[in-house]
Amino acid sequence: MQIGIALPQYGTHAQAGRVASFARDAEAAGFDSFWVSDRSLTPVEPSDVYPVTGYTPENPYPRAYTTFLDPLTVLTIAATATTRARLGTSTLNATWYPPLLLARSLTSLDRLSEGRVDVGLGLGWMRDEATAVNTDFDKRGAHLDEILDILHGIWTENPFGHEGPNWRIPRAHFDLRPVQRPRPPVLLGGFSPAAMRRIGRRADGWAGVTLPPDRHAALWDIARRAADEAGRDPAALRQEIRYFPEPEATPESIATALSAIRATGADGCFFDLQQSVNDPAEALDLGIRILDRVRAG
């Protein structure tokens, strides 16, 4: 299983000037991948509570989310500071972005990094965020399907044009091509049956989160069955799992948790320490100790 770490991006870790050194030192320590996530808004009175155990209307989301660096900017900094590690989004909320411009940004990043981008896309969980960027929260699944059509077309056809229910792109030249062919890998987030079926039908894998083993297995089986029904190879699907250690977690306890994630069949796991410690330097020190513990078995 590949081991990754979240880049400094939010809360007290949102220090743009430290992203490059963090990524450079983490790559030198042996991390396989770096990851970012996506938030556009943290409302004073949110429409929805963060869908993780422990959050309530009085405590609706992690307080650290009120400060959030742009995900693709952070990955661009990391790309220029490193040469080997993969660069992933877990996840970009795809429906917030015009798909034509999203394709341009992701293609540019894939070229800048010499083909190291993993495109993780999600749908978001907060209605307020969709309202703030003028998208229809209730139609986000259909919008994502059309976005996937457009990204695939731009990446694999030239010229390319699109006529759909939400976007019209005149037939045009797209000479800016990704390094990865036929396109960068696309991972999709979510933990509903509909999301897993979309992964099986359309994606290269799952940008997941840690779940109880039985639920993880049931959801993954949905994706694999959907792939088989679509005439795709279920064994080719990847799992990249995000893990949030508790603040009091030790390198040993985190390494044990990673072993359990490996047992689910995950191809990669990255841990996000931005809610565990207060500073990027602490996160990197703890992350390296975790990595050493995992590599030692």
Image: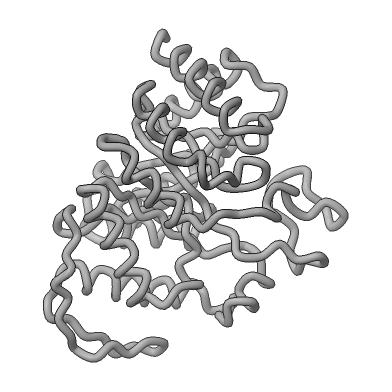
The quarter of the image holding the N terminus is top left
Residue visible at 26% across and 37% down? 83
For the C terminus, the image quarter is top left
Q: Please name the residue shown 37% across and 53% down the image.
A: 187
Decide: is 40 above or below 188.
below
Outermost residue, top side: 296
Find residue 75 and report its horizontal and vertical position in percent. Answer: 40, 49
Give whichever of 195, 104 is nearer the camera: 104
Colour pattern = one colour
Is residue 78 shown to the viewer in this render? yes
Q: Position of residue 34 (x, y in %)?
A: 41, 39
Note whether 259 is above or below 185 in the view shown. Answer: above
Left or right of 118, for residue 271: right
> Which image quadrant is residue 229 in?
bottom left
Horizontal side of 171 relative to 1 (left or right) equals left
Where residue 227 appears, as percent x and y from the top left, is: 30, 55
Residue occupying image coordinates x 26% and y 46%: 116
Q: In which quarter of the view is residue 214 placed?
A: top right
Question: Which residue is the extreme one toward the right?
Answer: 58
Q: Residue at x 73, y 44 (%)?
A: 53
